[in-house]
Image: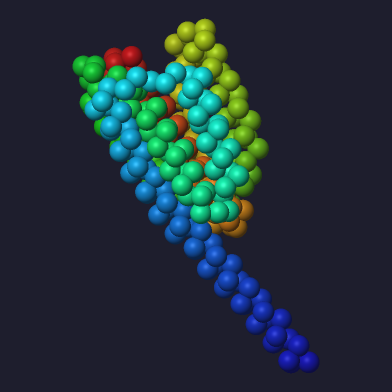
Amino acid sequence: MSTFNIQPAARTATSSGQSVMATNTVIRNTYLLLSMTLLFSALTAGVSVALKLPHPGLIVTLIGYFGLLFLTNRLRNSGWGVASVFALTGFMGYTLGPIIGHYLGLANGGQTVMMAMAGTATIFVGLSGYALTTRKDFSFMGGFLMVGVLVAFLAGLGAIFFEIPALSLTVSAAFVLLMSGLILYETSNIIHGGETNYVMATVTLFVAIFNLFTSLLHLLGFMNGDD
């Protein structure tokens, strides 16, 4: 009897250890790839600012973003998935360049950009650290975040087409909250084994950081009188 009792326990311990190792590997690979893509995106944004490249426009931006996102999702289990992530984040960095260039050309623009960067870094590190240390399960936020992002996205398009500044500011404020929630959700998802693909985990966190930064930039620009 004792033999049968010990073996399942040993298998359970082994399985649990393998699960922890797999989770730690996903976390390590995700943050490594995320760091690299953030640097690459910053580089493309810097080149875009330096060369004063024009913004590609809303339609090209949406087509490029969703097209590369679809490609990354299809290639997520191959080595080409990593290359696709860099293509996606590099493209997003390029679209960010003209926006940053616009703010840098304004009176308080440099201060606004630095504050947005500092705010983004503080929020991301704080929320990621909280999720990693407490290991709380934030999976319950999934449905709310999906609906919230969809509604905010459509509202943002409405604010652009109908030129409603108040709605645009509201959308930016909503995105700050939604992207903060997404950081908690995705980090928790990795910890608890809900996301086992570091390529897609990287994309999700990068998109959250990107939208968090642009939303803070818009809000801070308005408060500083830049917008």
> In x, y percent, where is residue 133?
46, 57
Q: How is the image coloured?
A: rainbow
Please identify the quarter of the rendering in which residue 9 is found: bottom right
User: What residue is shown at x 51% (from left), y 54% (from top)?
Assistant: 79
Q: Residue furthest left?
A: 107
| Residue drawn at the location 55% of the way across and 54% of the way down | 78
Q: Is residue 43 something that shows in the picture?
A: yes
Is 214 on the left-hand or right-hand side of 144? left
Q: Nearer the viewer, residue 208 or 41?
A: 41
On the image, the x and y values in percent for residue 50 come to 24, 27
In the rendered view, would you say 200 is above or below 146?
A: below
Front-lying residue, 79 or 225: 79
Quadrant placement of the C terminus: top left
Question: Seen from this angle, which residue lies furthest bottom?
Answer: 2
Q: Where does the N terminus fall, quadrant-wise?
A: bottom right
Residue 212 at what x, y percent from top left?
Answer: 43, 33
Q: Quick check: can you spot residue 115? A: no
In the displayed structure image, the side of residue 70 where residue 2 appears, left or right: right
Identify the residue shown where x is 37% and y is 49%: 35
Identify the residue shown where x is 58% and y is 71%. Answer: 18
The one nearer the camera, 165 or 89, is: 89
In this rendering, the answer to whether 11 lies above or below 111 is below
Q: Residue furthest right?
A: 1
> Does residue 49 sit above or below 122 in this rendering?
above
- How many numbered marks are there? 0
